[in-house]
Image: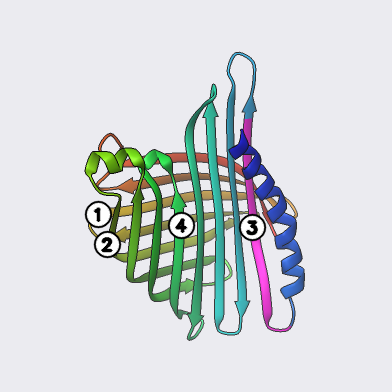
Amino acid sequence: MMNKLLIAAALTAATPFAAMAGADFVEGDKTFAGEAELGATLTTGNTDTTSLKGRLGLKHELGNWENEYTLEALYKEDTDEVTAERYFAGAQGNYKFDDNNYLFANANYEQDPFTGYDYKLTGAVGYGHRFIDTESTTLAMEVGPGYQYRRLDDEQSALLGYSSEDSVVAHGVLNFETKISDSSKFKQLIVADYGDQLEARSETSLTANIVGALAMKFAVIVRYNSEPLDGKKSTDTETNMTLLYSF
């Protein structure tokens, strides 16, 4: 219950703060924009279930710099048993040489107790290129070296005899987005880190405007790990229907 209250409080507090930040930063060549995403399901009676999905994405442009910040939270509970719990925080800075080429540096933190790890830290630097950048369609790719640190939970530490893993990784991103109509768009995002194992994440989403800046988003997320810990599966899937507010 405490985790659910913390998630709800954080999402509620973050949205107006981000909106105020946007109002403060729109000056001259400074721009600040973002998206707040939220979905929830609560049932009581013969079956008690709770499902919360939240995401806050911010983008700040200043001259040649484009900075992105992301917060995500997922929590699911079925009859007082937690069945899914994931928290993610990430930041990336892009230095643009021109409209299509840039250098990037990022850092990500992920916590998912169902993978056997207490948390994971990943950082990467490299080169990005926009192959298509029009009003209706964007196609961009990023590639570069990175580093990943994984902290095992107590159960896995006792089983394996060590408490952490780390490796140098090759980091790659493919991001495709296109408008289907004036009120809807399709997006495909693939993120992969390859070192002593392959970790990849694919998000396929369809967004349709409801009114003004409010939209409905349907997304299918697939996470893959080529070397899962004992007793863990290599593939996780997540299907969400959420409300999306752009500012």
Question: Toward which corner of the image does residue 19 lie, by quadrant?
Answer: bottom right
With respect to residue 47, does 71 lie above or below?
A: below
Disc 2 from disc 4: Cα separation: 15 Å
Membership of 214 in magenta stretch: no
Name the kind of residue labelled 2 in the image.
Ser
Residue 217, image x and y in percent?
59, 46
Name the kind of residue labelled 1 in the image.
Gln
User: Is the residue under label 1 in contact with that under label 2 (CB below 8 Å)?
Assistant: yes
Q: Which span is picked out in magenta? A: 28-41
Of marks 2 and 4, which one's residue comes earlier in the chain? 4
On the question of residue 226 being in view, the answer is: yes
Of marks 3 and 4, which one's residue comes earlier in the chain? 3
Task: Kindly identify which numbered label has been placed on residue 167.
Answer: 2
| Count of numbered marks | 4
Q: Nearer the viewer, residue 135 or 100?
A: 100
Q: Nearer the viewer, residue 87 or 144?
A: 87
Disc 3 from disc 2: Cα separation: 33 Å
The secondary structure making up most of the magenta span is: strand
With respect to residue 153, does 70 lie above or below?
A: below
Q: Is residue 38 left or right of residue 178?
A: right
Quadrant, the N terminus: top right
Which colour style is shown? rainbow
Disc 3 from disc 4: Cα separation: 20 Å
Q: Nearer the viewer, mark 4 or mark 1?
A: 4
Name the kind of residue labelled 4 in the image.
Tyr
The residue to which callout 1 is attached is 197
User: In what element is the residue under mark 2?
Assistant: strand
